[in-house]
């Protein structure tokens, strides 16, 4: 009977902990430099563990590429003052981002320059390895490096 109870407790703990494993690292992104991505919003998906923005970005030759920009969780963005209706498809905007190391059209949004002029940190606190990292003023207190 004790082993059955132990197995049940273990299964319950695994169910509670597995969602934490869903958070993935930003190791696939070049955190040594922040690059501005300017484009037209194609869509925003408010979800957890990360919200995503699709942006159509035109290069110097006129070719348009759809970028996937990963952001903090929807609740984190809302806590920073970014509401779901603040960005709509067709809006032109800039995101300061870490680009994917593999050269794909993927990025992590560090700072999102909203159409109304506000700048919102796009990272979650998990994406900062320390307060000394450029743009990170401590866990949950992200700020543009120029401040």
Image: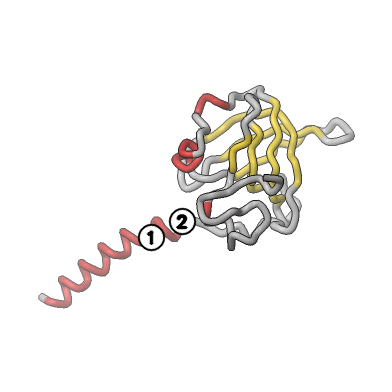
Q: Position of residue 36 (x, y in %)?
A: 75, 41
Along the line of sight, the residue nearer the viewer: 26 or 132: 132
Task: Tell me if residue 117 comes above or below residue 2 in the rendering.
Answer: above
Instruction: Name the residue: 73% across, 49% down.
Output: 34
Please tell me in which quadrant of the rendered image residue 117 appears: top right
Q: Is residue 29 left or right of residue 84?
A: right
Task: Tell me if residue 72 comes above or below residue 58 in the rendering.
Answer: below
Q: Position of residue 6 (x, y in %)?
A: 19, 73
Q: Marks 1 and 2: CB-CB under 8 Å?
A: yes
The N terminus: image quadrant: bottom left
In the picture, the disc for residue 58 is none
Instruction: Name the residue: 44% across, 60% down.
Output: 21
* Residue 106 visible in this rendered orientation of the protein: no
Q: Position of residue 53 (x, y in %)?
A: 60, 36
Residue farthest along the right direction in this orientation: 61
Instruction: Name the residue: 69% across, 49% down.
Output: 145
Badge 1 local density, few (<14 within 10 Å), some, or many (20+)?
few
In the picture, the disc for residue 22 is 2
Along the line of sight, the residue nearer the viewer: 39 or 10: 39
Q: What is the secondary structure assignment of the residue under circle 1?
A: helix
Label 1 sits on residue: 18
Please tell me in which quadrant of the rendered image residue 25 appears: bottom right
Q: How is the image coloured?
A: secondary structure
């Amino acid at each position: 009977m004790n082993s059955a109870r132990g197995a049940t407790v273990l299964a319950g703990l695994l169910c509670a902990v597995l969602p934490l494993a869903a958070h993935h690292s930003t190791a696939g992104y070049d955190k040594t430099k922040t690059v501005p991505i300017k484009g037209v919003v194609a869509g925003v998906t408010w979800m957890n563990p990360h919200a995503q923005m699709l942006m159509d970005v035109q290069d110097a030759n006129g070719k348009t590429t759809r970028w996937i920009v990963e952001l903090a969780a929807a609740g984190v963005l809302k806590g920073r003052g970014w509401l779901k209706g603040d960005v709509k498809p067709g809006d032109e905007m800039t995101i300061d981002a870490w680009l994917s190391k593999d050269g794909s059209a993927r990025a992590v949004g560090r700072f999102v320059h909203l159409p109304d002029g506000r700048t919102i940190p796009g990272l979650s606190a998990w994406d900062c390895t320390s307060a000394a990292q450029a743009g990170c003023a401590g866990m949950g207190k992200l700020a543009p490096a120029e401040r």
